[in-house]
Image (cartoon, coloured by chain):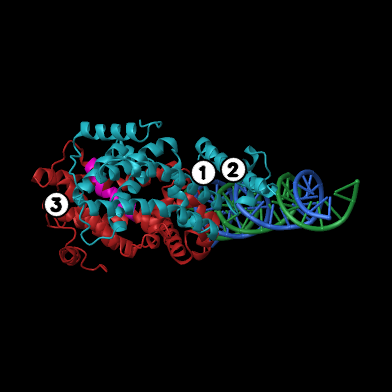
Chain colours: A red, B cyan, C green, D blue
Amino acid sequence: MGTKERRQREIADRELLFLEAARDLIRQDGLLNLAMARIADRCDYAVGTLYQHFCSKEDLLIALATINEQNRLDLLRQVMAWDAPTRDRMAGLAVADTVFVRRYPEHFRLVQFAYTEVIWGAASAERRRQSLEAGKPIGELVAALVTEAVERGDLEAQGLKPNEVAMGPWSVTLGTHNLVHTEGVLEQYDIRDPYRLMLRHVHSMLNGLGWKPYFDPSDDAALDRKIEQLCSEVFHDLDCG
Amino acid sequence: MGTKERRQREIADRELLFLEAARDLIRQDGLLNLAMARIADRCDYAVGTLYQHFCSKEDLLIALATINEQNRLDLLRQVMAWDAPTRDRMAGLAVADTVFVRRYPEHFRLVQFAYTEVIWGAASAERRRQSLEAGKPIGELVAALVTEAVERGDLEAQGLKPNEVAMGPWSVTLGTHNLVHTEGVLEQYDIRDPYRLMLRHVHSMLNGLGWKPYFDPSDDAALDRKIEQLCSEVFHDLDCG
DNA sequence: ACAAATTATGAACCTGATTCAAAAAATGAT
DNA sequence: ATCATTTTTTGAATCAGGTTCATAATTTGT
């Protein structure tokens, strides 16, 4: 009795269809102008059908952020599987984010909004659970890398748990994404290439954490080489700017 | 003819009244449940009057975030005026934020929301201008500190402009505030004292930037002493946790 | 004390999210 | 293939809350 399964698959496909339509609309008209009716329209379904999948607009936004995070996870996994020193992989995770931003320009803006009390709180409990669940592997990935670095002698944990160490670079990247998406700020402070700067600052922090081998953040050519290497060895097919 | 001035003052006072009511309501019922009618109610004014001050709800949110930032600026200025090495003052700025959070628990959550495309884009151009304007002194303050540090030989800029250096610690603190306000995340990664960790990571980054004198981030007692010192010498009257 | 100008009011309006009764489609037993 | 039953889809109606604006109240100037 494959009918039920087919149906199941169709439903899942439709959910994806809605989310992709939402993504398109956000890219096209901005998050500000996203309307449920328009998403349904674009997919030639009635709004009621859309509500069969998402119990509210907020719910849909969390769902969208969540599948994006899953795509991001794929990228991070590739970096993790890279045959390179722990430090290069750690820095590589930040590079992966810059690549991801090019592919999903709206993602971190959406994240900033979606994980706000207002949106998060209005999503369904189940959806929130899924979202947290989807985030778990990312945390584990980074924690595993920290653990490996400690084991290999590249890093001293100095009393911090892996997650606590990870929170350092994490806050740098998250903070940067935020600054990038806060209009007017970069212009005001005349910061031209925030993501390049992010990579430098990540390296400064890794240096500060004593994560070996030391890397000179002011060596632009070396940074270029690292990025180039990662892109050719890991992101074969992707736009590395 | 002081009548006009008095009137002016009354208007300004009322604006503050509205903003404080909004702040109270946010603390009480959450940003999610903030309603314009309720703000007006609580102040015993009609909604129309509220709209005489703020052309939209988003406008009000930006205004609230802006006056909060001005209060934050006061705190940061105190740190800047502290008679201490540049590095202590830099780290002190982060400590100031932790103090500020205790006083205005909703602020960074509000900021995260308000500076989102959706809210920012719906506020009036004038309000946005004011908000950027209000943020300027904070940037200048930090930039001035970086410049001073370079002049005193505490720090090598290594080709970065003051603002670009400042973006390092800035992203760490901003990122941390974000993590703190993203529900479920700290629990999931079992991070108990994010702001303490933030201070450690700020120090790691300052070490990584080569900002002298070196400070051992794993020395808990030393960190406590620094915090204690700042609180007694600068924040006499404030709750330093 | 009065006309003109300013300001405050809140019911009505409007937008867009959400619901739900009715219609359509799918299922499955005969 | 037919029909009763169940499931799914539909979109007009409802609802919530932000916003407007004609009217009322107040202030100002003479």
Chain ID at mark 2: B
Mark 1, residues whose alpha carbon is within 10 Å: few (<14), some, or many (≥20)? some
Work out whether residue A173 or residue D6 is closer to the camera in this orientation and state it: A173
Q: Is residue B81 above or below residue A96?
A: above
Work out whether residue B171 or residue A36 is closer to the camera in this orientation and state it: B171
Task: Answer with mark 1 or mark 2, whichever residue precedes in sequence.
Answer: 2
Q: Which residues are magenta?
A: A164-176
Please tell me whether mark 1 or mark 2 is closer to you in this view. 2
Residue occupying the far left of the picture = A153
| Alpha carbon distance from label 3 to label 1 | 42 Å
Residue at 25% in and 45% down: B87
Chain ID at mark 3: A
Residue B10, given in percent of the width and then of the height, sits at 64, 44
Co-location on one chain, circles 1 and 2? yes
The amino acid beneath tag 2 is Phe
Residue at 19% in and 47% down: B212
The amino acid beneath tag 3 is Thr
| Alpha carbon distance from label 1 to label 2 | 18 Å
In the rendered image, the quadrant that contains the C terminus of chain B is top left
Residue A236, given in percent of the width and then of the height, sits at 20, 67
Please give the residue where the numbered disc 2 appears in the rendered image: B18
Residue A165 covered by magenta stretch: yes
> Quadrant of residue A125 in the image?
top left
Co-location on one chain, circles 3 and 1? no
| Alpha carbon distance from label 3 to label 2 | 53 Å
Q: Secondary structure at mark 1?
A: helix
**Which mark is on residue A86?**
3
Please give the residue where the numbered disc 1 appears in the rendered image: B32
The amino acid beneath tag 1 is Leu
Chain ID at mark 1: B
Residue A6 visible at all: no
Q: Is residue A143 above or below residue A88?
A: above
